[in-house]
Amino acid sequence: MALAGVRFTAGAAQKAVDAVRRALPQLAVLPPDQKLPTDAYVLTVDEKGISVNLGKQRLLVDFPSYLQRLRSFSPKDPLLRAVGVPERNSSSAAAPFVVDATAGFAFDSFLLAAFGCRVAMVEVQPVMALLLQDALEKAQSSEHEQLRSIASRLSLHQGDSGVLLLQDGGALSKPDVVYIDTFFPHKHRLRPGQKKGEEGAQLVYVTEKRTAATSGRMAFLRALHEADLRGKLGHSEIPPYALHEASEASTRRLVETALAVASRIVVKRPSHAPSVKDLLPELSSRISYRPYESRDTRWDVLVKTTA
């Protein structure tokens, strides 16, 4: 696990304390006055709510700050177009019901809900589900009318989305869209002196550097994700290419499951990553594909053309 322990400080709400104890009973309880380590994550429950700390860095799901970011988005944003969010002046089209199968810190879920979608957020990691639930409850009881309105279109479901999507009659039944934000595959390059397509050419996987741009929330999510993959692979030390391949296999399985329950699948990828349709070549005759791109991100849209 990516967490070294949990701290309960004076002023922490008993409801939050109980939620953490139920979700993570095995987590070591640290003294509230213990200095926070700079090389390990610590879950903190205090008067402000539930957060994760790495040294002085505090990570939480901050819906009020997301609200401030909304002004820079319009229905022409690539994500909203990929999901099929109608223009604001459209009177005939209804906003889709979206299952965000990999919620994480949930900015994309929040953005979709702000533009009228009903969004079911699914999070497999118990610690992330705690952060999301804490943020959602605060937003639902906020004095800010717009924040409450957006929160009313969000719901949270903790568990494996690949399992929850297949439960007949469940809260995730019959989504219009399944949205998947997978972990970006490691960038790769050919070995020196080799050419693309050359027989025997081998790829060298380049481990992403944890700079300021990739630290914080993304680094924490990646730490949780890689800890899970290492557990599934049965080794504590896994080379980057193996983590990459395991992550891509996981993406493929989730896309296949999503195609069984929804007609439209949107997969967020980095611009340098292979198209998600290339992960599923056997389905090419059953789906149409269209990418939507920003400067460094691509949303691969798969739409079923036949049953």
Image (spheres, rainbow, N blue to C red):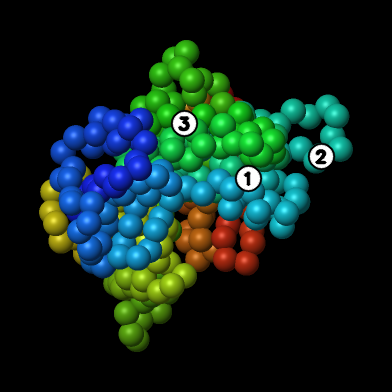
Indicate the position of residue 184 as horizontal and vertical percent values.
43, 58
Q: Residue at x 39, y 58 (%)?
A: 58
From the image, tell me which residue sits under label 2: 88
Local crowd size for mark 1, using a 10 Å CA cut-off: few (<14), some (14–19), many (≥20): many
Residue in the picture at 74% in, 28% down:
94
State the separation of the CA atoms marked 3 and 2.
Answer: 26 Å
Q: CA distance from mark 1 to mark 3?
A: 15 Å
Residue at the far left in the pictured view: 235
Against 33, residue 140 (above or below) is above
Residue at position x 56%, y 37% from top? 139
Residue at 40 percent of width and 66 percent of height:
215
Q: Give the image location of residue 237, x and y in percent.
A: 15, 61
What's the amino acid at mark 1?
Answer: Leu
Give the left or right position of residue 148, taking residue 257 as reference.
right
Amino acid carrying mark 3 in the image = Leu
Q: How many numbered dots are placed on residues in this image?
A: 3
Q: Compute the Cα span from label 2 to label 1.
A: 14 Å
Residue sitting farthest toward the bottom: 193
Q: Which numbered disc, 2 or 1, marks the residue that appears first in the sequence?
A: 2
Camera sees residue 29: yes
Q: Amino acid at mark 2?
A: Arg
- Between residues 203 and 184, which one lies in front from this camera angle? 184
Location of residue 142 in the rendering, given as x and y in whole percent from the top left corner: 59, 36
Q: Which mark is residue 111?
A: 1
Q: Is residue 121 left or right of residue 187?
A: right
Quarter of the image where the C terminus is located: top right
Give the mark nearest the N terminus, 3 or 2. 2
For label 3, the SS is: strand
Mark 3 Cα within 10 Å, few/some/many (few <14, many 20+)? some
Nearer-the-camera pick, 288 or 38: 38
Labelled disc at residue 156: 3
Q: Secondary structure at mark 2?
A: loop
